Image (tube, grey):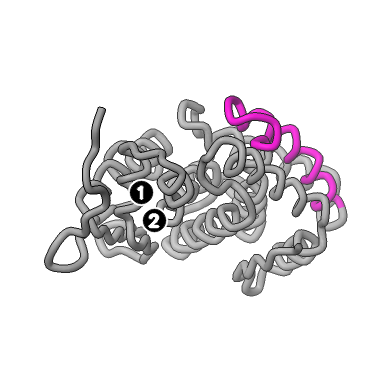
């Protein structure tokens, strides 16, 4: 079953053309299905399929557009004299492909994702760009895919945005499957505390990430996971994060926790 992506491509006709192809690509859709078979059914892990990659793609695109609106120059523009529209293609494609390696294994899935992404880049880019341009975009997409691995050095703005966007998919649905299957730990409990994540234009810095929590356990998601994804990306100077607890009382997530 095909999944609607609803990427706001705006005036970017290259991105529209790619998204039209994505919508019709049975092979890619099936890879996402296989990713979730591994992640959800076999590992009792969080969603790594079409819903997740759609969230990441939209978040990465929004982050990039806020930065370019504030005159921040993507690497593909600065280093190769291409356009902001091409940077949008890079972050969306990297987001779409970043977890395909889950079809092989959880450990090292980033490297496997690079292999799959190379094949799909050739499929999508060669009909839109000349050979030199498609090769450049492929290189940038592959770096961004690999760089969503936490220990990987981030060398481009676009790669940093994909890494941060991946971490921003933290609303409580991300933990629902492992939590309900009995996996009660700080990761699942803290993720259940995250009610809403908003990407806004900031005042002191270009980007404000506003996180609404029902329980202070959500601080773990922000301090241990999101902060680590932002650090050492070069994005620290562009992003502010504010976390707030909704309601007058914290929502109880678990009754008791025993070792």
Could you tell me which quadrant the N terminus lies in? bottom right
Q: Position of residue 249 (x, y in %)?
A: 13, 63
Q: Specify start and end residues of the magenta stretch as a single range.
A: 101-126
Indicate the position of residue 158 as horizontal and vertical percent values.
Answer: 54, 46
Q: Quadrant of the C terminus?
A: top left
- For the residues marked 1 and 2, what is the alpha-carbon distance in whole angstroms? 5 Å
Q: Which sits in the foreground, 77 or 210? A: 210
Q: Which mark is residue 191?
A: 1
Write the residue at 60% across / 70% down: 8
Element at label 2: loop
- Picture coordinates of residue 95 (x, y %)? 60, 49
Magenta segment, prevailing SS (helix, strand or loop)? helix
Determine if residue 154 is in view. Answer: yes
Q: Is residue 216 left or right of residue 170?
A: left
User: Where residue 33 sits in the image (x, y, percent)?
Assistant: 70, 49
- Residue 108 lies in the magenta-colored region: yes
Relative to 174, residue 12 above or below: below
Q: Residues within 10 Å of mark 1 (few under 14, many from 20)?
A: many
Q: Secondary structure at mark 1?
A: helix
Report whether 33 appears left or right of 84: right
The residue positioned 80% from the left and 61% from the top of the image is 21
Mark 2 crowd level (few <14, some 14–19, many ≥20, 10 Å Cα): many
Give the numbered dot on residue 172: 2
Based on the picture, tell me whether residue 209 belongs to the magenta stretch. no
Q: Residue furthest left?
A: 248
Residue positioned 40% across, 56% down in the render: 171
Q: Are marks 1 and 2 in contact (CB under 8 Å)?
A: yes
């Amino acid at each position: 079953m095909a999944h609607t992506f609803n990427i706001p491509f705006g005036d970017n006709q290259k991105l529209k053309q790619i998204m039209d192809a994505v919508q019709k690509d049975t092979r890619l859709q099936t890879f996402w299905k296989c990713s979730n078979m591994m992640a959800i059914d076999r590992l009792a892990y969080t969603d790594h399929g079409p819903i997740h990659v759609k969230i990441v793609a939209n978040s990465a695109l929004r982050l990039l557009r806020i930065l370019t609106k504030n005159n921040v120059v993507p690497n593909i523009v600065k280093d190769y004299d291409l356009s902001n529209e091409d940077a949008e293609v890079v972050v969306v494609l990297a987001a779409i492909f970043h977890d395909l390696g889950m079809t092989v294994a959880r450990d090292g899935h980033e490297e496997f994702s690079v292999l799959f992404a190379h094949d799909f880049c050739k499929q999508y880019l060669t009909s839109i760009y000349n050979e030199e341009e498609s090769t450049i975009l492929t290189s940038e997409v592959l770096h961004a895919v690999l760089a969503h691995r936490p220990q990987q050095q981030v060398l481009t703005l676009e790669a940093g945005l994909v890494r941060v966007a991946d971490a921003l998919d933290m609303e409580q649905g991300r933990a629902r499957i492992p939590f309900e299957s009995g996996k009660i730990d700080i990761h699942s409990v803290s993720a259940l505390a995250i009610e809403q994540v908003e990407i806004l234009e900031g005042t002191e810095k270009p980007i404000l990430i506003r996180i609404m929590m029902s329980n202070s356990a959500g601080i773990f998601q922000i301090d241990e996971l999101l902060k680590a994804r932002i650090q050492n990306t070069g994005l620290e100077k562009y992003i502010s994060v504010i976390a707030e607890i909704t309601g007058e009382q914290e929502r109880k997530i678990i009754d008791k926790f025993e070792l």
